[in-house]
Image (tube, rainbow, N blue to C red):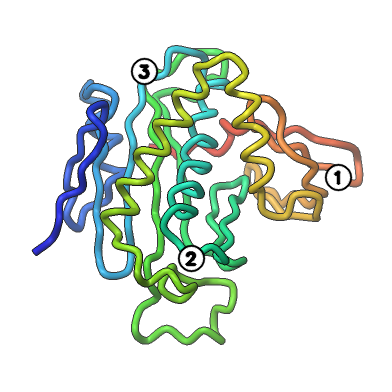
Amino acid sequence: MSIAPQFPPRLKGLAAGPANPMVIACDQARRGVEAGLLPWSIGPERLRAALVLAPETALETAIGAFAACGVGLQNALGALAPPEVAVHLEWQGGLRVNGGHCGTLSVAASINDPKAEPDWLIVGLDLTLRQPPDWEPGETPDWTGLHEEGCGEIVPVHLLEAWARHCLVWLNELEQAGGRARLHREWEALAWKRGQDIVLVQNGARLTGRFLGVDENFGVLLKTATGTRLIPLHSRLMEV
């Protein structure tokens, strides 16, 4: 018998079954659902969830929620996983566990104008719990799952609950004096390949450069052959 997750009072869980929680969240947001809806889906191999938010600031600053939910996931895994497990965040949304790709964070909003205030903003989580039975590690050495990284004892429902709680902590931090700077420091400490060369895809083009860090709105600072370039985080918005 499956166990229904227990969320903080500000959140309302919605079991999505095999459906995509991100699709459900976007559909409900368009219909005017209140902030705090959290559709979720847990299967043998994946944990998926999406958190609906109602920002009260321009998109370019509101999208800091994406970083907050990323740090929230690291905090949740830090509380439940063995201490030797390392979790890092890719700027584009990838999740790394012990260096292997283990899932993705995504973000969508009602608008893409950075200076306008969105009616809603949604952060989605797609986490690999374990690789399928026919998985051959040698064929995809850069991909992994929590089970393969020694986290098989984590109860997925408990991880979902912990993610929700830690997300709220950091989303609340964003509203406090100095909270954005604290989140900035925390996120940069977890950033995958900071200080190294990375490849980003921007408007269909591949950009290669040194990942210097992020600005106050979590846009990536990329040092290329032609100079340092800022790519804003809202450029990562999903098309919904």
Count residues near mark 3 (Cα–Cα under 10 Å), then give few for <14, some for 14-19, many for 20+.
some
Residue furthest toward the left? 1
How far separated are the C-alphas under marks 1 and 3?
35 Å
Q: Which quadrant is the N terminus positioned in?
A: bottom left
Residue that badge 3 annotates: 119
Residue furthest toward the right? 226
Q: Amino acid at mark 1?
A: Thr
Dot 3: what SS? loop
Q: Which quadrant is the C terminus positioned in?
A: top left
Q: Is residue 74 left or right of residue 91?
A: left
Q: Residue 3: x and y, percent? A: 15, 56
Q: Amino acid at mark 2?
A: Pro
Count residues near mark 2 (Cα–Cα under 10 Å), then give few for <14, some for 14-19, many for 20+.
some
Looking at the rendered structure, the number of numbered marks drawn on it comes to: 3
Residue that badge 1 annotates: 224
Residue that badge 2 annotates: 82
Mark 1 vs mark 2: in front: 2
Dot 1: what SS? strand
Q: Residue at x 22, y 28 (%)?
A: 9
